[in-house]
Amino acid sequence: MSAAPPLLQGQCQPVVGASEARSPEPRNTAPGRPPTGKPDAGSPQFYDEPNFTVAGVTDTTNLGGHSSAVVQRNTEALTKEAISLKQESPTGSQPSFDATAEKSLRESLEHDPRNAALHHSLADTEEKLGNALEAVREYQRAAELDPSEPNLFDWGAELLLHHAPKPAMEVFAKGNRMFPHSARMLIALGVGWQAQGANDRALRCLFDASDLNPRDPTPYVFLGKMQNTEIVHAAGFAEKMERFARWQPENALANYYYATTLWERANDSADAPTAAQIESLLQKAVRLDPKLGIAYLQLGILYAARRDFPNAIAVYQRASEVSPELEEAHYRLADAYRRVGEKTKAEHELQLYKELTKKKSEEAERERHEIQQFVFALRDQSPATQSHQHQ
């Protein structure tokens, strides 16, 4: 199986049906075409559908991938953020997630098997009960019966949650084609590309999402969380962060992300005017949100670069107070204490850093074992269909 589907130049969408594979069970439809022969009365009319089936699940003991452990943790955090874009139940009610609810839903579906809302509720229930494979199948069924924006997004999100970015991207790509004004479809596509190490494609998707409604902070926040050395120097990235800060001046994260963008692009050695701008943005960020530990941390990094260690220590301490889980604050604080001769305090902070790092690594590993990974198979396509799609 190929590492990633081919792309249309300059776009974030994968080419539909570009992968080739064989399945033992033929289908009566081809992607993008009406059914041949008499359609199955019980099957939904869902043309141009994603070209895979979920075959099963396994644990995530070996996810593989392109990234280091730290980058993998960041990718997993972004995935959680994308999944959190799922909307609440349209009814506003709190469904019951237990075996009784599951049985009741299945009984209802026996009488009304084409009710997409029932399939979606059953999917929610199966996910909460830990039945990942059943959950994705029910989300898929709901989306096939009613390919609405919420149903497609939830199906893709379920796949993304279970470390299946490529099939998830096929669903989100379908959703983007059907609902081109859905920012979260583009955001999810971007997260899928980022999970596969395709930062340029990830940026294209997030840029497109931010352009749908330039005053919506969500795409910019994802861009900010996606920051790394490669991404921050990419064409257009700084302009998007500047626009975020300019159009959302009272948003703490807008000020923080623009500041970190300027800092990264200056290679940690900004000239005096740029350093002053960065400091102003960060100070505004912590005024707007006094509990934004990452902004205090970045202020400390700025002060330490000036060798202003007393101020660096003060803001590092504040970062660790408001965000105790922020391990880098302890590491930086240990270094600052060492530089001013406070050896005992430096050793204490370094020990805290090691303990936090170990705890986070263990938590991440435990979570990976709890989340199952989907195994999927590409559907059969005739050579004529493949040829048509490659054109």
Image: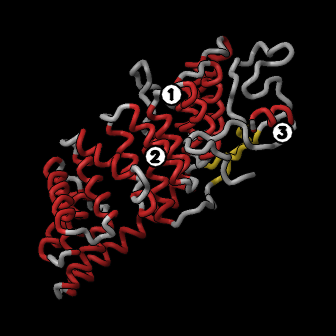
Label 3: few (<14), some or many (≥20) within 10 Å? few
Q: Residues within 10 Å of mark 2 (few under 14, many from 20)?
A: some
Regarding mark 3 in the picture, which secondary structure is present there?
loop
The residue beneath circle 2 is: 80
Instruction: Give left or right: position of 2 versus 359.
Output: right
State the residue position of label 3: 23
Left or right of 209 in this view: 152: right
Tell me which amino acid carries mark 3. Answer: Ser
Gap between marks 2 and 1 measured at Cα? 23 Å
CB-based contact (under 8 Å), mark 3 and mark 1: no
> Cα distance, mark 3 to mark 2?
32 Å
Residue 181's place in the image compared with 285, above or below, is above
Query: Which numbered disc, 3 or 2, marks the residue that appears first in the sequence?
Result: 3
Read off the residue under disc 1. Answer: 180
Q: Give the residue type that dot 1 points to.
A: Pro
User: Horizontal placement of 143 versus 351: left or right?
Assistant: right
Examine the rendering and report whether any part of residue 173 can be seen.
Answer: yes
Quadrant of the rendering where the C terminus is positioned:
top right
Callout 2: SS: helix
